[in-house]
Each structure stands twice: as structure tokens, then as C-alpha cells.
Image (tube, grey):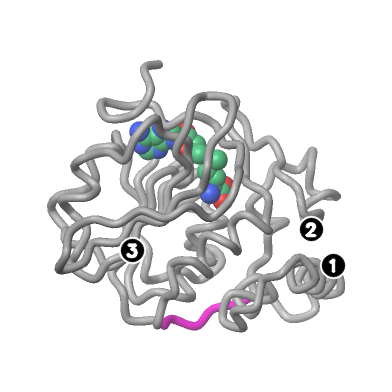
């Protein structure tokens, strides 16, 4: 697990503490996840125009029709992945890079794929500025995974898909966990996919609403 953090005294510590309290109240129990939220400067990952809302427990626009997801849902993803700090993780849908930053504190190495080059570039810059050294941001169709670095112990898909993209299941290590919102463009169920010696098992976590995963094994543009 890499260590990084916020600039002490950046003026947002109280807001982060309130957000952590909100997440705890809503049922997030994993202390490592709560610590990552407490130490990650969400305000640096959102556009200036919504910076004053950075520590609300809500999704916010990040440009290009995309959103940074609700912190509660992001924390839930990470809790469900049950990371130990040693995993090689793949994230599909870097977006602002905020969840990548959380993931980088909970896993050993993170590869994150974003299809929109300008978002990938922005995320790279903020991740670097905030000291996330164990992260590589790639541009491409994440429904194909990223074969060069496979297999992955954990895969986090941050956009809605009609089904689990086959390449992601193939690139999931045995014993690995994959979390993905499955459904149509309007509504989805956050789903845990586990690859075990018995095969692939799926379980539902809860209802969510995400922007679509656009790609060969997702939705069409
Ligand atoms: N977790 C992100 C954050 O903290 O800001 C938010 C992710 S946003 C809900 C979903 C992202 O998935 C968008 O940035 C979108 O461009 C990206 N996306 C959609 N289809 C994709 C694909 N096939 N491969 C990679 N990224 C994709």
C-alpha cells in the first residue's frame, strides 16, 4: 500500500472529516477505505466551477458529459473489492482520477483505462500532483481490459455495462474480484463477479446509476 495524502492545512480537512462521517453513517465500515477518503483531496479532482461542492456526497459533472461518482458509491465499490494493499488492480473509466487515487491507497499497483484522452491527461496530472506513484493511466477501450499487465487481482468498472465484458473476466486472476454496474442505460445493479476454482460467480450489491461504458464489449456510442 502506497502512502500519500493531502497537503496538511489545505483548508478542506474539516469537509473531508464530515464526508467520512457521512459515509460511516450510511454504512461504510472498512477503515482503510474511510482513511483513504479522509486523505484524498477530492476538491483537486473536480472542475473549479463545482469545487465548492467537492465534499458533498453527490456525483458532480467533470466535463465531456461525464461525472465523478457519488463518494458513497465509490467507497462501496472499494469495500466490496476487499483489498489488502498488495493487489494489482485494473480500473476501467478513470474519469477525474479521484477513485483511482482512493484505489491507489488500497492496492499495490493500479492500471486505469479511460477512453477520453483529455480526461486521462487531466487525471494523470492531478494524480501526479497528489503523489499517486503506483498508478498508470492508459487511453483506450477498457472493455478490452489491458492484456499486457493481466491478470488482475481486482477490477473496478466505473461505467454501466449491459453485461460483464468477456476480456475482463479472462483477465481476472483466480480468486480475483471484479465490481461492475450491470443493466441498461437508465438503471443498473452494482454486481460483484468472483473468479473461483468453481468458475465465475455473481452477486448483487445494490441499485446504482452510471454513465454508459462505451466500447466493443459495452454499449455503442
Ligand atoms: N470513478 C471516476 C471518478 O472518480 O471520477 C468516474 C468515472 S465516470 C462515472 C465513467 C468514466 O468511464 C468516464 O470518464 C467515461 O469516459 C469512461 N468510459 C466509458 N466507457 C469507457 C471505456 N470503454 N473504456 C474506458 N473508459 C470508459
Q: Nearer the viewer, mark 3 or mark 2?
A: 3
Q: Earlier in the sequence, mark 2 or mark 1?
A: 1
Q: Pointer 2 and pointer 1: residues touching (CB < 8 Å)?
A: yes
Query: Residue 43, located in which quarter of the rendered image?
Result: bottom right
Percent coordinates x, y for residue 73 in the rendering? 62, 54
Q: Can the viewer see residue 116 in this picture?
A: no
Q: Can the viewer see residue 34 in this picture?
A: yes
Residue 29 within the magenta-colored segment of the rendering = no
Percent coordinates x, y for residue 15 in the rendering? 84, 67
Q: Which residue is mark 1?
A: 15
For image coordinates 36% across by 70% down, the residue present is: 134
Percent coordinates x, y for residue 66 in the rendering? 58, 32
Is residue 28 depicted above or below 156 in this figure? below
- Range covered by the magenta-colored residues: 1-5
Q: Secondary structure at mark 3?
A: strand
Q: Earlier in the sequence, mark 3 or mark 1?
A: 1
Residue 177, numbered circle: 3
Percent coordinates x, y for residue 52 in the rendering? 85, 50
Residue positioned most to the front:
198
Mark 1 within 8 Å of ligand 1, using the beta carbon: no
How crowded is the residue under tag 2: few (<14 C-alpha within 10 Å), some, or many (20+)? many
Left of 89 or right of it: where is 189? right
Q: Nearer the viewer, mark 3 or mark 1?
A: 3
Q: Which residue is mark 2?
A: 55
Amino acid at each position: 500500500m502506497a502512502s500519500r495524502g493531502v497537503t496538511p492545512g489545505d483548508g478542506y480537512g474539516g469537509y473531508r472529516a464530515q464526508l467520512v462521517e457521512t459515509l460511516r453513517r450510511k454504512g461504510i465500515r472498512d477503515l482503510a477505505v474511510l482513511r483513504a477518503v479522509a486523505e484524498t483531496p477530492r476538491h483537486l479532482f473536480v472542475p473549479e466551477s463545482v469545487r465548492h461542492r467537492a465534499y458533498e456526497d453527490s456525483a458532480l459533472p467533470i466535463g465531456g458529459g461525464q461525472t465523478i461518482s457519488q463518494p458513497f458509491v465509490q467507497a462501496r465499490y472499494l469495500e466490496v473489492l476487499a483489498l489488502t494493499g498488495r493487489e494489482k488492480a485494473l480500473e476501467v473509466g478513470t474519469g477525474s482520477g479521484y477513485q483511482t487515487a482512493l484505489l491507489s491507497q488500497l492496492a499495490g499497483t493500479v492500471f486505469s483505462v479511460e477512453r477520453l484522452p483529455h480526461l486521462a491527461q487531466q487525471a494523470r496530472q492531478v494524480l501526479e500532483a497528489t503523489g499517486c506513484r503506483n498508478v498508470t493511466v492508459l487511453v483506450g477501450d477498457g472493455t478490452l481490459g489491458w492484456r499486457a499487465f493481466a491478470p488482475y487481482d481486482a477490477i473496478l468498472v466505473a461505467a454501466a455495462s449491459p453485461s460483464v465484458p468477456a476480456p475482463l473476466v479472462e483477465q481476472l486472476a483466480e480468486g480475483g474480484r471484479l465490481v461492475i454496474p450491470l443493466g441498461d442505460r437508465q438503471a443498473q445493479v452494482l454486481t460483484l463477479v468472483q473468479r473461483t476454482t468453481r468458475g465465475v460467480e455473481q452477486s448483487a450489491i445494490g441499485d446504482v446509476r452510471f454513465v454508459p461504458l462505451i466500447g466493443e464489449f459495452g454499449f455503442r456510442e
